[in-house]
Amino acid sequence: MTLADAYALATLTGTLMLAVGWCIGRYHRRTDASRAERVARPPGPHPAAVADELALALAALATSCCLTAAVTAGAEHDPAHCTRKDQTL
């Protein structure tokens, strides 16, 4: 093995070691960041998911003819409070 070959091998080995070290460090930084995010996140459902479900429920309530119909998904109606008098079961 010549000196040029040894130098090329050492350069290749050093480059590979740097790349592996960078990948390992990146992995640890990402897992530490995700672990910190999970610890900081409040327990329970995500607020955006709750807001979406609430918006869907309010939209269903707004399109129903009465509260009883909204709660029973249209299976029952309350004639005293029904806004659509043409609703029949």
Image: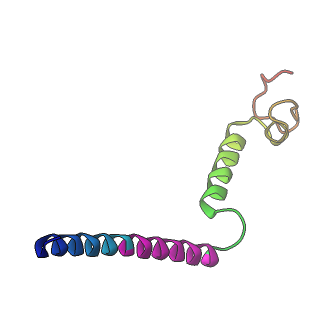
Residue 48 figure quarter: bottom right
The image position of residue 80, as x and y in percent, is 88, 37
User: Could you tell whether 45 is left or right of 3 in the image?
Assistant: right
The image position of residue 51, as x and y in percent, is 63, 57
> What residue is drawn where x is 23% and y is 75%?
10
The image position of residue 55, as x and y in percent, is 63, 50
The stretch in magenta equals: 21-40
Main SS of the magenta segment?
Answer: helix
Quarter placement of the N terminus: bottom left
> What residue is drawn where x is 62% and y is 52%?
52
The number of discs equals 0
The image position of residue 26, as x and y in percent, is 42, 72
> What residue is drawn where x is 37% and y is 70%?
20
Which one is nearer the viewer's eye here, 37 or 60? Answer: 37
> What residue is drawn where x is 44% and y is 73%?
24
Residue 17 figure quarter: bottom left
Which one is nearer the viewer's eye here, 39 or 66? Answer: 39
